[in-house]
Image (tube, grey):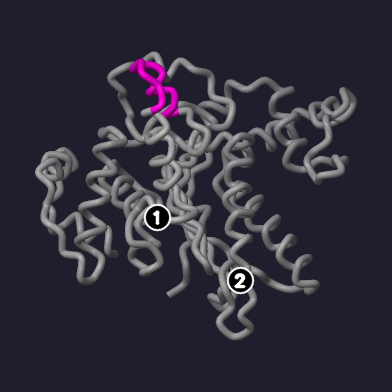
């Protein structure tokens, strides 16, 4: 059966949450350790993670979760055309320049655009409108991820040809239950694959970075300072916060510099999400049938899901 065209799935002017998957060609371990040659490509996973963070600070798209595996990439994106509409023409031009600069610094980063560079991008109103639309496009976000990683990998291998199997797969997540299940599925990928025993040991995942910031909150004493560490931390500060409606709203007033917005994604706190994730991982991992934590059923009840249905959704 033919795959549905992404234009029929992804809306341009509508906020959507989308689960995107991209696999390496022939599902080869082009980001891990090649079992045939023994060559280690693990460093490429860091390339992908860094690229996602860079794009989160340029595009009008919230990154809700990610997992960089040895031969494929998971990322959960929420496009924000509403936010992009508030950006000035100069902001649009500057962000596009950062994606496709005509001059670069010695380290490969985009050079500071001159005034004339920005004026060229702003000269044509139709072109500028197209750039504005692209900056909230999930397809363009994935394109700017995949193409750059493919070029870097081919340059390292001194070869040409495909790095990715083809275009990315996209699944729209229609409600909070679907978003929560998908976030758990993505964060538990290393656990399910037998590569990590716990979420905090799952390298190159959004949950590992969130946990690191949560731990760093113990270093400060005031509630406001703890909130800042959790929601704007050094590790996961580029990711969308977990909680939609935090108890202390002051933390959301901090202007985001590494991401599009401070909008959360779930009706639960980060600690609650981690409890749910820990319980789910124990149920899904063979030989690790843990007991159901007392705090889990209320969360599932708020999602209108039974424990059995929740596990079925995450597994699939």
SS type, badge 1: helix
Q: Main secondary structure of the magenta part?
A: helix
Residue 36 place in picture, x, y as percent: 59, 85
At a point 35% along the width and 57% down the height, the residue shown is 188
Residue 168, placed above or below residue 136: below
SS type, badge 2: loop
Which numbered dot is residue 201? 1
Q: Which segment did they paint magenta? A: 219-231
Specify whether 6 is left or right of 41.
left
At a point 53% along the width and 53% down the height, the residue shown is 7
**Relative depth, front residue between 115 and 30:** 30
* Mark closer to the chain start, 2 or 1: 2
At a point 77% along the width and 36% down the height, the residue shown is 97
Question: Crowding near pointer 1: few (<14 within 10 Å), some, many (20+)?
Answer: some
- Identify the residue under disc 2: 30
Residue 161 place in picture, x, y as percent: 73, 73
Disc 2 from disc 1: Cα separation: 22 Å
Count up the numbered dots: 2
């Amino acid at each position: 059966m033919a795959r549905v065209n992404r234009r029929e799935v992804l809306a341009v002017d509508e906020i959507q949450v989308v689960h995107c998957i991209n696999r390496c060609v022939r599902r080869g371990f082009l980001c891990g350790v090649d079992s045939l040659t023994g060559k280690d490509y693990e460093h490429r996973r860091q390339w992908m993670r860094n690229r996602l963070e860079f794009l989160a600070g340029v595009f009008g798209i919230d990154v809700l979760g990610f997992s960089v595996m040895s031969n494929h990439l998971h990322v959960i994106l929420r496009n924000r055309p509403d936010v992009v509409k508030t950006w000035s023409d100069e902001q649009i031009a500057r962000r596009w320049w950062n994606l496709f600069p005509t001059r670069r610094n010695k380290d490969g980063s985009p050079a500071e655009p001159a005034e004339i560079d920005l004026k060229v991008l702003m000269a044509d109103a139709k072109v500028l409108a197209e750039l504005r639309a692209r900056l909230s496009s999930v397809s363009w976000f994935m394109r700017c991820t995949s193409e750059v990683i493919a070029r870097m990998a081919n340059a390292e291998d001194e070869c040409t040809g495909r790095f990715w199997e083809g275009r990315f797969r996209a699944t729209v997540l229609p409600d909070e239950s679907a978003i929560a299940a998908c976030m758990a599925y993505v964060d538990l990928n290393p656990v399910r694959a037998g590569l990590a025993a716990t979420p905090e040991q799952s390298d190159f995942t959004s949950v590992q970075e969130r946990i690191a910031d949560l731990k760093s909150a113990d270093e400060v004493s005031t509630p406001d300072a703890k909130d800042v560490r959790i929601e704007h931390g050094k590790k996961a500060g580029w990711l969308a916060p977990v909680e939609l409606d935090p108890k202390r709203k002051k933390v959301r007033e901090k202007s985001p510099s590494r991401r599009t917005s401070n909008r959360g994604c779930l009706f639960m706190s980060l600690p609650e999400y981690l409890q749910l994730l820990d319980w789910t991982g124990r149920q899904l991992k063979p030989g690790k049938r843990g007991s159901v934590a007392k705090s889990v059923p209320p969360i599932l009840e708020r999602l209108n899901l039974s424990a059995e249905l929740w596990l079925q959704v995450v597994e699939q």
